[in-house]
Image (spheres, grey):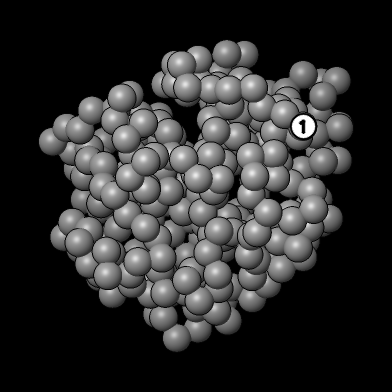
């Protein structure tokens, strides 16, 4: 895998780490894959604090996806940049069609652990290739999961991806994490992804402005670290975790937005 694709192992480790503790996220598949595919992480990538944060982010995406499926059970779910994530197994709501998308080398590993079914499929997809978006399955509405991918796309590439998805479906709902410009600049010097060789990321300060002529709007901002999930940490750990991953300072670097057309 190239350096960007290797970043998938950081959240995989985090989900495996908390799942073994029985908190935040129960993810037997992450435990299984990490045991067989994992390697020795170094630096901040191996931090338990980052593991907690990655798992909470995943749980927020899970809960949002469940909520969207409850509202629109006929929608197709499309997870672009799925890595080894097992959200397709973790969500509680039934779905009619779920599509996990990533690069060929990522899916080659993923296929060792996941089997396609009548409702679950995997598809090779480069998020920068908007022509490939036209090959996505038909459907009236789509629930789009963009977790940990926007920061590897330029502003133009991100806008083009969202616009192509809007053109493909009558209605889309998107949950997406983004670096701010300040966050992207900081990540080049101090970010766990540096530990797997990634040194270039991109940020956006005015997502609404970027999407102004796409027909897709920012409708809300979500927290990566809801209070009920922080409460699952040991009392002795909560204060330090909050200092690292909550508050206005954290929001100046990293944010989570819900979009809709």
Locate residue 255, reporting x and y percent: 66, 57
Locate residue 68, reporting x and y percent: 38, 50
All told, the count of numbered labels is: 1
Query: Is residue 79 among the parts visible in the rendering?
Result: no
Is 191 left, or right, of 206 in this rendering? right
Who is closer to the viewer here, 152 or 73?
152
Locate residue 152, reporting x and y percent: 55, 58
The residue drawn where x is 78% and y is 58% is 186
Which residue, as the protein is rendered here, is positioned at the far left?
A: 118
The residue drawn where x is 35% and y is 32% is 110
Residue 227 versus residue 72 in the image, above or below = above
Identify the image quadrant of residue 238.
top right
The residue drawn where x is 33% and y is 39% is 107
Query: Is residue 200 among the parts visible in the rendering?
Result: yes
Mark 1 packing: few (<14 Cα in 10 Å), some, or many (20+)? few
Who is closer to the viewer here, 180 or 227?
180
Who is closer to the viewer here, 49 or 187?
187
Q: Quadrant of the C terminus?
A: bottom left
Name the residue carrying label 1: 43
The residue drawn where x is 50% and y is 83% is 212
Identify the element where label 1 is drawn.
helix
Locate residue 163, reporting x and y percent: 38, 75
Which residue, as the protein is rendered here, is positioned at the far bottom?
A: 213
Is 221 left, or right, of 100 in this rendering? right
Is 40 left, or right, of 154 in this rendering? right
């Amino acid at each position: 895998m190239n350096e960007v694709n290797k970043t998938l192992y950081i959240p995989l480790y985090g989900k495996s780490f908390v799942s073994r503790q029985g908190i935040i996220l129960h993810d037997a598949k992450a435990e299984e894959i990490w045991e067989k595919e994992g390697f020795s992480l170094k630096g901040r990538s191996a931090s338990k604090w980052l593991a907690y944060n990655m798992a909470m982010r995943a749980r927020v995406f899970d809960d949002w996806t469940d909520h969207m499926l409850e509202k629109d059970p006929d929608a197709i779910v499309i997870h672009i940049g799925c890595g080894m994530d097992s959200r397709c197994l973790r969500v509680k709501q039934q779905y009619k069609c779920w599509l996990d998308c990533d690069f060929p080398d990522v899916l080659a590993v993923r296929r060792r652990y996941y089997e396609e079914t009548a409702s679950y499929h995997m598809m090779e997809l480069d998020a920068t290739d908007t022509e490939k978006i036209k090959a996505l399955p038909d459907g009236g509405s789509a629930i789009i999961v963009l977790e940990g991918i926007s920061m590897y796309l330029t502003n133009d590439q991100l806008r083009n991806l969202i616009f192509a998805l809007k053109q493909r479906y009558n209605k889309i709902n998107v949950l997406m994490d983004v670096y701010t410009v300040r966050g992207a600049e900081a990540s080049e010097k101090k970010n766990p992804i540096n530990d797997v060789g990634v040194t270039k990321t991109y940020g956006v300060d005015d997502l609404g402005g970027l999407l102004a002529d796409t027909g897709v709007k920012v409708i809300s901002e979500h927290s990566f670290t809801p209070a009920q999930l922080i409460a699952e940490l040991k009392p002795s750990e909560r204060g330090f975790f909050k200092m690292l991953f909550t508050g206005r300072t954290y929001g100046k670097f990293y944010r989570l937005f819900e979009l809709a057309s």
